[in-house]
Image: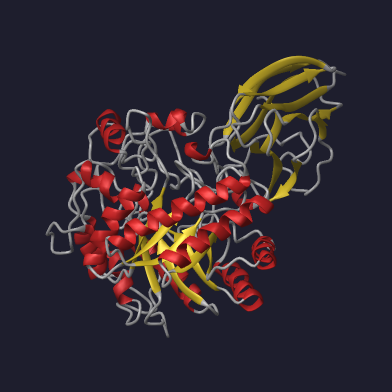
Amino acid sequence: MRKKTWIAMLLLPALLLAVCAPLAAAEDTLHVIQVKDLPEDFILGMDLSSLLAEERSGVRYFDFDGREKDLLQIMADNGITHIRVRVWNDPYDEQGRGFGGGNCDIGTALEIGKRASQFGLKLIVDFHYSDFWADPGKYKAPRAWEGLDASAKAQALYAYTRESLETLRDADVDVGMVQIGNEINNGLAGETDWNAILPMLAAGARAVREVCPEALVAVHFTEPHNRGLYSYYADLLRDYGLDYDVFGSSYYPFWHGTLENLSEVLTEINRNYGKQVMVLETSWPYTGEDTDFSGNSVNEDSWGTRDYPFTVQGQADAVRDVIDTVAHIPGGIGICYWEGAWITVGGASWEENSAKWEEFGSGWASSFAAVYDPDDAGRWYGGSSWDNQAFFDASGHPLASLRLFSLLRSGSGDQSRRETAPAPEEQPAEDLPNLLENGSFESGELSPWILIDRCRGGELFVEDKAVDSLEGSWHMHFWNPNRDSVDFDLEQTVEDLPEGSYVYSVSIMGGDCGETEIFAYVKVNGELRFTEPMRVTVWNSWDTAVIPQIALSAGETLTVGVSVKCQGAGNGAWGKIDCAALRAED
């Protein structure tokens, strides 16, 4: 998961659904449009990586009759066929305190896998090859592999994969699929060069073939909406001769474009490369409310696609449509819902919940993760940002949408009924016009902005990528894989402004930036007059600087801009700049 994303630190008052009647009781009918010709062996997966940490925090799960049951049995009873678990090499500090996110080492996978096998569920093992979260924005090597060159890492990866799978095999866990890496678009185990990554993937695949020959070997990428990207990766894998079965993709409808596009890019993979395809992560919110005082990655205010409402029926419709799409792609073998039971641990305040997140690892990260990831988890640790996308309410009772998986082949309710997302609220127009040209880069060009790049190298350009934009689809993008590699100013000069008072604003987001010196600035006649500090934290967490009361005399020239300097957090730094505006003040 990209994260993508992860942490909103606004500690807003939560709607404590735990004191309310279960939402499932209020849902008398779930309308499920039949998925025609759904194969009997189609994988209906559910990622439950946080399960043990949730249970140790006191969370309990119930069936539709209100009886407490093993979550794995509840899933099997409702049509789920596979359980997915992420595996980190060593998500603990020297005192044995867990990093959070479920503290998902191979021991966690073993316990969940044994329970899954009791109910006839296969396991999807998702190796991250890191000690904590790995995704396109971070892919740090496990601490035990630090200092190893790429060849030695491949050997270590082989040994680790083989030993881990032997642990599962010897316990009679039914392993159905193994992912050799998680969303590996930009790197794996600290390596960014595909000449280093490909031998590591081959080592992992070889270990799977030797220990679990019946299991499918999957590679996992994300950002299917970036056309041409998947073919690029598939070319690399084919040209190297990688032995794998499944080309897997994340697909979150609010981030990753249309289902039509998803179908097209995965169909190309099957037809051109002969690989099975699968959506390894997907989800949709059933509410915009937060229940654990830690904020949500996706809420009512999030920018993105809103083809479905944030309701129980909307959740069912969204997931049903992903399933229908993949089932009708040549070589489409299944989908997996991401963390469908990661709900609040039930405290009445952030402080109560935080104590459990820290002790049991049931939040997305604990403070102890700082020894491995000081610039992200170490600063923004907290709870679940996904509780509003679970299939259970805050008291652990199932939502009616969980019935979806068992109703796909028959359908249920009104086959023509479909909830629609509410139309976006009309945003009030600005009273005064933006005096900057191309303030949101929607022209697709840099001009009339001036770029002053003091480092060079990496990427620094205007980019067309809607999910990374605050407004529209274009923004200014920067990325460099090396430390101390991002150092630039971006500015625009405006002449012939009338005498008066002005306000300037600009927004930025990004990640992996380490120590930074970022600020918005205003120059008058070339002289720096105003600055406002800015920061980058995680993906989609925008920081907006506002500089008001800019007094300008007749004939003076105004220059506005943003200065960005990032040390980088091990793997360089990246970010996006958008929505610059200069307006006269009333």
Residue 479 vs residue 97, the one in the foreground: 97
Count of numbered marks: 0
The picture places residue 335, in percent across and down from the top left corner, at 44, 67
Residue 436, percent from left and from top: 77, 35
Q: Colour scheme in the image?
A: secondary structure
Q: In x, y percent, where is residue 201?
A: 57, 57
Decide: is 445 above or below 549.
below
Q: Identify the residue at image location x=71%, y=22%.
A: 521
Residue 207 in view of the camera: yes
Q: Residue at x 19, y 48 (%)?
A: 20
Q: Nearer the viewer, residue 315 or 269?
A: 269
Q: Position of residue 228 (x, y in %)?
A: 69, 63
- Residue 93, picture quadrant: top left
The quarter of the displayed image where residue 561 is located: top right
In the displayed orientation, state which residue is furthest to the bottom: 37
Left/right of residue 383 with respect to residue 509 in the rendered view: left
Front one among 519 and 267: 267
Give the position of the C terminus as an image quadrant.
top right
Q: Is residue 398 visible?
A: no
Q: Nearer the viewer, residue 333 or 170?
A: 170
